[in-house]
Image (cartoon, rainbow, N blue to C red):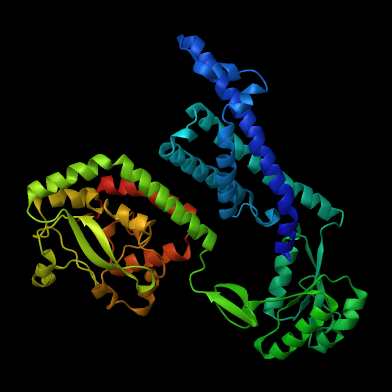
Amino acid sequence: MIREQEQYFTPPLLFLDILSIIISYGICTFLSLKIMAFGSRLFNVPLYPKIAYLEFPYYLNCYVHLLPLLFIVLFIFLYLFNCYRFLTIQKTVSILQRTAFSCLFSSVIFLAFMVIYYPLRADLCFILIYFPLVWILITGNRLCLPLFIRYEHGKGNFIRYLLIIGTNEKALGACRLFNAHPEWGIRVVGLLTDDKSEVGKKLCNCPVAGLITDLLAVLENNVVDCILFAGGIHNLQQLSSLALRCNIEGIDFAFDASTILENVGNIFVERLDTISLFVLKGVPHSPQKLFLKRLIDILLSVSLIILFLPIFIILPILIKRDSPGPILFRQERVGKNGRRFIMYKFRSMVMDADKYQDDLLHLNEMDGPVFKITNDPRITRFGNFLRISSLDEFPQLFNVLKGEMSLVGPRPPIHAEVQQYRPWDKKRLSVTPGITCLWQVNGRNETTFDEWMKLDQQYIENWSLTLDFKILLRTPPAVFSRRGAR
């Protein structure tokens, strides 16, 4: 119903976005060159060869090599942040946030490409003007198009007429929902019931048009684009016959999945040859967004490794001088859905520290199947600094590159801890583990084990690229504050 209208209005919105990018490019190229020309005159500095581009239309060629990347990156993020969802069901604040984060992530990825690949370099002035301007224009597209759609709804265009089968609370709830949101373009024609006493009445301002057995007569006397089945579980045979009737007559048929399964998560239907699968996703994460999360992990981890290359050179020397033993601490951890991998850390303890853990169990300060103690005697002098500053975690950037970890996600446990998990604790293993997470930025070892598990489940159930970005921004302050670090 709504998705069909979403698909109908996506092409014009896409055209407006393409136009916005081209207009932003032209304006920003001209302004950035004019600003540089003014700066060169003010400070008596030559503008180098770009002075030749200051006249129309020659200035448009200045950054033309960047246009493909500007298009691709921005459209990927607009898609992943659901900026092409049917606009009339989105609030203005949501539209502003989605487009803002799309442009913000696009600018970050664009800058990462510039750092990694020199030919994509552009003047900072251009970048500082381009992304705010393109955000204003694509946001304007999404605020103006719904006004046009509502205007057309007022004239009776783009309206879908819905017949609801059932008069139970779920059916009445659907009536209230559609009546409360006329901007969705769905009008309820009426309700069908299996109770004769309700025929002719009005429920939630919707007429009860007849009995369910009167379906054909109701269809003949009313414009009906779609039928929504909201009956109970005892009406499954009825549901099957109604779906068949709608298929014969070419009318769309929908049903509320919660009439069959309560508390369902994300559902999708998959057809494999002659088999139709009705799939309930345990962790409803979009494959497209997970792909983008992986792309961001690769780009940012490569950038961070290059940026902090001196740390990867200096710390091994200091670790070796402080205590004998290997530079890296390697430990088997449990990743997504039980996959095992070797996690890397800069060594902060004496050699063979694991062998002494049993002797220190009585000092454990964490509840649950986790071992943490303040002033652990196994930690070396320099290792204490590594722990407090979280510099010992830096080698995990290579785990991220290998795909075993992500920048953001629940911390990977050891197998002995997983064996003591309660069933609901294991949900934290349903996603790729990470270097930082909600637990890291909310006090770390100051939280209880149950609070830790709740934070991880909260992250999994509410995951989005926006949430990842917020956690990444909160991680440096959490590290510098040293709150909960041991």
> What residue is shown at x 57% (from left), y 40% (from top)?
70
Residue 229 is situated, as x and y percent measured from the top left of the image, at 73, 79
Quadrant where the N terminus sits is bottom right
Left or right, 279 with reference to 147: left
Q: Is residue 477 above or below residue 49?
A: below
Foreground pick, 243 / 113: 113
Left or right, 253 with reference to 380: right
Furthest residue toward right:
221
Quadrant where the C terminus sits is bottom left
Foreground pick, 307 / 52: 52
Left or right, 161 with reference to 309: right
Q: Is residue 313 above or below residue 231?
A: above
Report how many numbered discs are placed on residues in the image: 0
> What residue is shown at x 61% (from left), y 32% (from top)?
25
> What residue is shown at x 37% (from left), y 79% (from top)?
423
Residue 435 is situated, as x and y percent measured from the top left of the image, at 32, 56
Q: Quadrant of residue 209?
A: bottom right
* Residue 395 in view (yes/no): yes
Q: Quadrant of residue 193?
A: bottom right
Q: Is residue 125 above or below residue 96?
A: above
Residue 373 is situated, as x and y percent measured from the top left of the image, at 16, 63
Residue 240 is situated, as x and y percent measured from the top left of the image, at 73, 86
Left or right, 194 with reference to 316: right
Q: Quadrant of residue 60?
A: top right
* Residue 436 in view (yes/no): no
